[in-house]
Image (cartoon, rainbow, N blue to C red):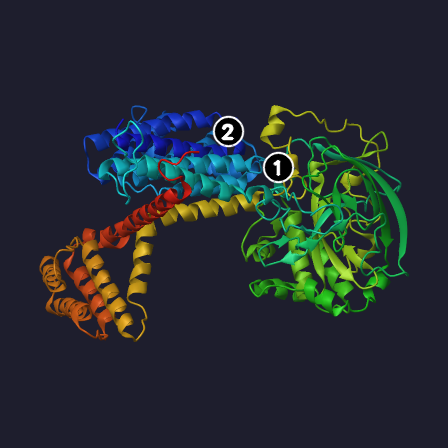
């Protein structure tokens, strides 16, 4: 097998090894075999066209064409001409599949089902990455830059996967890349002969040395580098790249932090499932469950685009929780006890509890976050099949207590009334209009609740997108359609603009009583609601979402003619009448698997299997990173040249040494510019003759020609004068030469000089020289580590 063929095989293997990181994302993972086969055909076409040989761009074009034909045959055979030639219908089908795949990506938790849309995205992406790797490493003989597309492929997979063996995928991808570098090194050695200095080392019975020593040294360097890269991997847990939010604690009761992950990723999907699958079953000591909201976590960090939990310090779970912040002694309260059992499939990092909790009895590894009064799993602990008992307070403030509440502490008010400058002005304007004439923050809060729930003309619709960006709340106020996320986000943001401390709580609305006196909480009970702070009462629940949950008794509307629901009556979801229907089955049907019902589907409830936290934002970040890397690859030569031109023509010192360095750098920029426009450098000529050659071949106008000769004269002056002097205006001269080349060159030449400048081959030369110097230094160290020749052991 020839060196280039061996390099092509290594490129195929490296791409395939990097693609294995995608295997945990979908099920079943049989797509890897199809991708391997199509990738092998793509690689074979490249090998055949290079053997002809075709020009490099034609080789890449042939591979791209065959790739398109293969994808057409596999995914759009019925819409294509003769089953393989893509036409308008085939491209439309591709667009439909990609749209379907995008919808599936935003809907399903990991592992997602292998629908055609997702399969096209994965296999097509692997083929695109494979083409980029083969082009860089084999067609253009630059294996080092081929690591960028491999990195893009691995980064997307690593950003989405929550597998416990992520280190294995990294190891496979890194091994493939090192193998590719090693194959290129062997090929270069075979073509160039012995490129490392030093006398050849022979062994008894052998009269030749060959490239074994440098290859062996390269292997050892690669192994050491890979080992160093792998060392930190076992410690990477928690934070934004951990989909489950695992590792939030640093031990038992020893501190740590809770990661600021967003639990509102797929709340709409939970509300739209066909079967209201049971999540929790509970028994409580209270007879009225209309206020028995199960709170998971509070979102208090508002950046104008979304709400998310702040990063908080966590401690060991205390035996008795402290009194909630702001709750005074004069507020009526009672203690209730609730026994909660989580379904065996429901995996959530946070422990759903009535608020405010005063104590919890739960087995396992859990931690306590004092500010939000939440309990969170430590190092992989989640709610799957967990049963626990919660003691909580049923706080019953009066409207008078809320209306006469004093101002909250300055620090608390500053933190929880913060809104970004990017928040559209219509949010604050609408809040002021709705609450005009109010005499207290309490009255403002009630008017806001009435506006959303009764008087504002809003409609509850779970099919509306959550919306992203700075204008999401403004759009909701205009369209007046949404579900609990929209209502809670908007009311909390508007309350903050009025100076009322506010945050958003995520959890479950009261469930449905069953015939056995238990209460069933299902996926469709997933809910979000605002909590507003009143000094002396603490964080207080409001319910702005129409037809959801129950309106608190202390927020009875003061608006004449209001038809707000009777706060003493539970909502339809909290009826005290025994249910005639059996509780939701916990069997996992195929349809439920497709709907993600067999894993935790609500972002606040169970985003992904094994309680893996909400990964939608991580997925978007990883996809954005991958797209950025993919976009960077074709433009990297242009970016490198722009950077080099800026450095070479930039500021410089005033000494004689600085004069020489700056002048030679400017000359190198000029010759590289000429090279980019098709005039290759000739190192054998003097600067004066080289300048004349550039002017002649470049057909430069007199002004640009004079600029070239001025730079050449400056180079000769610093090279041969006893005391080199700095010549002013050299950078300006080079820029004038660039304009001259652009005026005389054709459009295609100008485009190539901009996007694919020939002088970027210097990067490859520099990498090769660096590898050579490293191997030379490594070889020079070897005699000091060996016994002298002839010495006995």
Sequence-wise, the earlier of marks 2 and 1 is: 2
Give the residue drawn at x 27%, y 52%: 762
Numbered circle sitting on residue 114: 2
Q: Is residue 586 above or below residue 347?
A: above
Quarter-of-image position of residue 713? bottom left
Instruction: Assign the C terminus to one quadrant of the image.
Output: top left
Q: Nearer the viewer, residue 681 or 108?
A: 681
Check disc 2 and report its element: helix, strand or loop. Answer: loop
Question: Along the horizontal axis of the image, is 59 left or right of 147?
Answer: left
User: Which class describes the residues within 10 Å of circle 1: few (<14), some (14-19), or many (20+)?
Assistant: many
**Is residue 69 in view from this perspective?**
no
x then y, percent, for residue 233: 55, 42
Q: Is residue 370 above or below residue 416?
A: above
Numbered circle sitting on residue 608: 1
Instruction: Assign the N terminus to one quadrant of the image.
Output: top left
Numbered circle sitting on residue 581: none
User: Which class describes the residues within 10 Å of circle 2: few (<14), some (14-19), or many (20+)?
Assistant: many
Q: Nearer the viewer, residue 364 or 551?
A: 364
x then y, percent, for residue 615: 58, 42
Task: Quote the CA–CA distance across marks 2 and 1.
Answer: 16 Å
Q: Nearer the viewer, residue 778 or 587?
A: 778
Q: Is residue 87 above or below residue 352?
A: above
């Amino acid at each position: 097998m020839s060196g280039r063929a061996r390099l092509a095989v290594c490129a195929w293997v490296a791409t395939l090894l990097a693609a294995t990181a995608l295997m945990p994302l979908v099920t079943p993972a049989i797509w890897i075999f199809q991708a391997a086969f199509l990738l092998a055909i793509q690689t074979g076409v490249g090998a055949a066209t290079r053997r002809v040989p075709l020009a490099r761009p034609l080789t890449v074009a042939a591979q791209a064409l065959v790739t398109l034909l293969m994808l057409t045959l596999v995914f759009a055979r019925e819409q294509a001409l003769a089953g393989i030639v893509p036409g308008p219908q085939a491209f439309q089908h591709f667009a439909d599949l990609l749209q379907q795949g995008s919808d599936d990506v935003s809907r399903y938790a990991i592992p997602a089902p292998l629908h055609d849309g997702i399969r096209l995205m994965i296999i097509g992406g692997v083929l695109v990455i494979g083409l980029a790797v083969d082009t860089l490493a084999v067609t253009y003989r630059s294996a080092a830059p081929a690591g960028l597309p491999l990195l893009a492929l691995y980064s997307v997979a690593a950003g989405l996967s929550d597998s416990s063996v992520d280190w294995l995928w990294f190891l496979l991808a890194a091994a493939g890349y090192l193998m590719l570098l090693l194959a290129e090194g062997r090929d270069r050695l075979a073509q160039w002969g012995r490129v490392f200095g030093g006398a050849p080392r022979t062994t008894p019975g052998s009269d030749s040395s060959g490239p074994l020593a440098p290859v062996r040294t390269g292997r050892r360097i690669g192994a050491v580098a890979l080992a160093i890269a792998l060392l930190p991997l076992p410690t990477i847990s928690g934070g934004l790249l951990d989909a489950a939010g695992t590792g939030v604690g640093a031990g038992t009761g020893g501190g740590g932090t809770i990661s600021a992950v967003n639990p509102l990723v797929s709340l709409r999907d939970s509300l739209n499932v066909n079967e209201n699958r049971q999540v929790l079953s509970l028994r409580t000591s209270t007879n009225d469950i209309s206020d028995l909201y199960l709170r998971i976590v509070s979102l208090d960090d508002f950046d104008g685009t979304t709400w998310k939990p702040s990063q908080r310090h966590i401690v060991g779970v205390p035996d008795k929780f402290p009194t909630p912040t702001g709750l005074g002694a004069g507020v009526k309260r009672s203690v209730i006890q609730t026994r909660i059992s989580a379904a065996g499939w429901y995996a959530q990092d946070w422990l759903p509890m009535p608020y405010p909790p005063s104590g919890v009895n739960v087995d396992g590894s859990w931690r306590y976050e004092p500010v939000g009064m939440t309990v969170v799993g430590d190092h992989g602990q989640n709610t799957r099949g967990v049963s626990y008992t919660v003691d909580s307070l049923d706080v019953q403030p009066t409207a008078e207590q809320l209306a006469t509440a004093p101002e909250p502490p300055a620090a608390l008010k500053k933190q929880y009334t913060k809104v970004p400058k990017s928040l559209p002005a219509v949010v604050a304007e609408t809040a002021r209009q709705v609450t005009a004439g109010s005499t207290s923050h309490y009255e403002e809060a009630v008017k806001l609740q009435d506006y959303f729930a009764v008087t504002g003309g809003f409609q509850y619709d779970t099919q509306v997108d959550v919306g992203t960006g700075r204008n999401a709340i403004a759009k909701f106020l205009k369209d007046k359609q949404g579900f609990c996320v929209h209502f809670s986000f908007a009311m909390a943001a508007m309350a903050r603009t009025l100076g009322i401390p506010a945050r958003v709580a995520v959890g479950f609305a009261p469930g449905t009583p069953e015939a056995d006196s238990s209460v069933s909480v299902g996926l469709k009970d997933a809910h979000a609601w605002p909590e507003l702070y009143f000094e002396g009462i603490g964080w207080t629940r409001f319910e702005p979402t129409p037809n959801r949950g129950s309106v608190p008794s202390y927020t009875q509307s003061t608006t004449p003619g209001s038809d707000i629901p009777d706060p003493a009556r539970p909502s339809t979801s909290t009826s005290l009448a025994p249910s005639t229907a059996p509780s939701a089955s916990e069997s996992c049907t195929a349809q439920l698997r497709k709907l993600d019902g067999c894993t935790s589907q609500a972002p606040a409830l169970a985003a992904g299997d094994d309680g893996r936290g909400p990964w939608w934002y991580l997925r978007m970040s990883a996809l954005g990173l991958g797209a950025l890397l993919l976009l960077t690859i074709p433009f990297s030569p242009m970016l490198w040249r722009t950077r080099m031109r800026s450095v070479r023509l930039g500021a410089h010192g005033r000494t004689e040494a600085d004069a020489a360095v700056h002048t030679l750098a400017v000359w190198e920029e000029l010759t590289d510019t000429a090279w980019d426009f098709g005039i290759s450098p000739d190192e054998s000529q003097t600067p004066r003759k080289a300048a004349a050659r550039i002017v002649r071949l470049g057909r430069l106008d007199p002004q640009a020609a004079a600029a070239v000769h001025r730079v050449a004269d400056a180079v000769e002056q610093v090279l041969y004068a006893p005391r080199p002097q700095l010549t002013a205006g050299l950078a300006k001269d080079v820029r004038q030469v660039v304009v001259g080349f652009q005026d005389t060159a054709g459009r295609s030449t100008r485009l190539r000089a901009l996007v694919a400048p020939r002088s970027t081959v210097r990067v490859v030369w520099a990498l090769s020289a660096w590898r050579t110097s490293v191997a030379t230094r490594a070889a020079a160290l070897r005699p000091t580590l060996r016994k002298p020749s002839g010495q006995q052991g």
